[in-house]
């Protein structure tokens, strides 16, 4: 009789312990999920607001280009995305019958030029399409004056058309 | 002539132009490349952003080169992502370049009948096959 009640108390204690542990694990996983969700949301908000507030055009421009640099991924992957953006720009313009570039220079050369171009904040409003054109001018050996002249012309035109916010 | 027919005919004319410009060995950015993005170990938001920038780039290039793929006033490209994802979920569509997938997504959004979209898709596939055979 004495042993039986002792065993019962022991069993009850075990059950309580298991229940407490299970509850602990459950609450921990719920907390972890909540924390990861809020961090994820905050990260998303900061990423998009940064993009939206700084951008003055609705085109893919230097802000988008530099945003690729901020993504948490290996450098190779970032270069691949940038190359893809240029490849698609070229492809679309060719399919439309008005190729943005006429030479067959390597995309890597263009990526490097555009990386440097967008390092300067004053160039970030230039759409990638025109940055690519400038990269081609540079690769073909045009003088930096000619490239700057082209840039000024494009920016004036886009501003006149109201495509760049003042 | 109905507006939707005009869209299909102008798209076919664009196809004629591109087939004379590109080298037959050229590899387009197709559904095969698009679906690879989903396989990357990045967060959903990063993948969405990547896809969105990609679509904006194509659209910009089409505007600046004279024929916008979809409405030039379009700002929300994220709404096209699920349509394109769904389009490329069928492996038959994998060989179609993203340019045409975006065009088809735009057609779907405008409510162009499925039959006309299929006519357009078949014409593109035929042209691409001819283009590959040339090489």
Image (cartoon, rainbow, N blue to C red):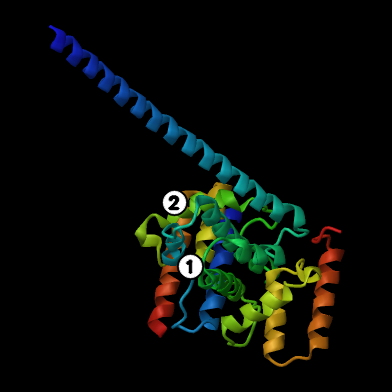
In what element is the residue under mark 1? loop
B25 lies left or right of A61 = left
Viewer-proximal residue among A146 and B131 = A146
B47 lies left or right of B53 = left
B26 lies left or right of A126 = left
Determine which of the numbered discs, if any, sits on residue B86 in the image. 2
For disc 1, the neighbor class at 10 Å (few under 14, some 14 to 19, many from 20) is many
| Residue that lies at the very extreme toward the bottom in this rendered image | A141
Where is residue A6? Give x, y as percent: 19, 13
Determine which of the numbered discs, if any, sits on residue B97 in the image. 1
Q: Which chain carries label 2?
A: B
Q: In which quarter of the image is the C terminus of chain B?
A: bottom left
Where is residue B116? Give x, y as percent: 48, 55
Where is residue B93? Give x, y as percent: 40, 61
Q: In which quarter of the image is the N terminus of chain B?
A: bottom right
Residue A142 drawn above or below residue B56: below
Q: Residue at x 50, y 64 (%)?
A: B98
Residue B91 drawn above or below residue B128: above
Q: Mark 1 lies on which chain?
A: B
Q: Which residue is drawn at 84% across and 76% down?
A: A152
Viewer-proximal residue among A39 and B60 = A39
Labels 2 and 1 within one chain: yes
In whole angstroms, how far apart are the C-alphas of marks 2 and 1? Answer: 15 Å
Q: Residue at x 41, y 70 (%)?
A: B126
């Amino acid at each position: 009789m004495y042993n039986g009640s002792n065993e019962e108390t022991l069993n009850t204690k075990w059950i309580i312990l298991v229940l407490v542990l299970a509850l602990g694990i459950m609450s921990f996983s719920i907390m972890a999920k909540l924390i990861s969700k809020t961090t994820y949301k905050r990260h998303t908000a900061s990423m998009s607001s940064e993009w939206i507030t700084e951008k003055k055009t609705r085109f893919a421009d230097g802000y988008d280009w530099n945003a690729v640099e901020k993504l948490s991924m290996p450098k190779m992957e970032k270069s691949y995305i940038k190359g893809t953006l240029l490849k698609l720009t070229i492809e679309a313009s060719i399919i439309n019958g008005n190729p943005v570039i006429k030479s067959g220079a390597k995309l890597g050369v263009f990526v490097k030029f555009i990386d440097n171009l967008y390092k300067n904040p004053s160039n970030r409003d230039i759409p990638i399409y025109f940055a690519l054109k400038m990269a081609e001018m540079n690769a073909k050996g045009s003088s930096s004056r000619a490239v700057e002249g082209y840039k000024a012309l494009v920016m004036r035109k886009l501003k006149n058309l109201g495509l760049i916010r003042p | 002539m109905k507006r939707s027919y005009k869209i299909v005919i102008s798209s076919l004319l664009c196809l004629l132009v591109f087939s004379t410009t590109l080298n037959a060995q050229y590899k387009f950015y197709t559904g095969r490349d698009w679906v690879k993005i989903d396989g990357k170990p990045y967060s959903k938001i990063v993948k969405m952003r990547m896809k969105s920038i990609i679509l904006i780039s194509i659209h910009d290039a089409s505007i600046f080169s004279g024929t916008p793929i979809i409405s030039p006033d379009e700002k929300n490209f994220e709404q096209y992502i699920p349509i394109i994802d769904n389009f490329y979920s069928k492996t038959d569509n994998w060989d179609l370049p993203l340019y045409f997938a975006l065009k088809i997504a735009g057609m779907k959004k405008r409510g162009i009948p499925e039959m006309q979209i299929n006519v357009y898709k078949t014409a593109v596939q035929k042209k691409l096959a001819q283009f590959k055979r040339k090489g």
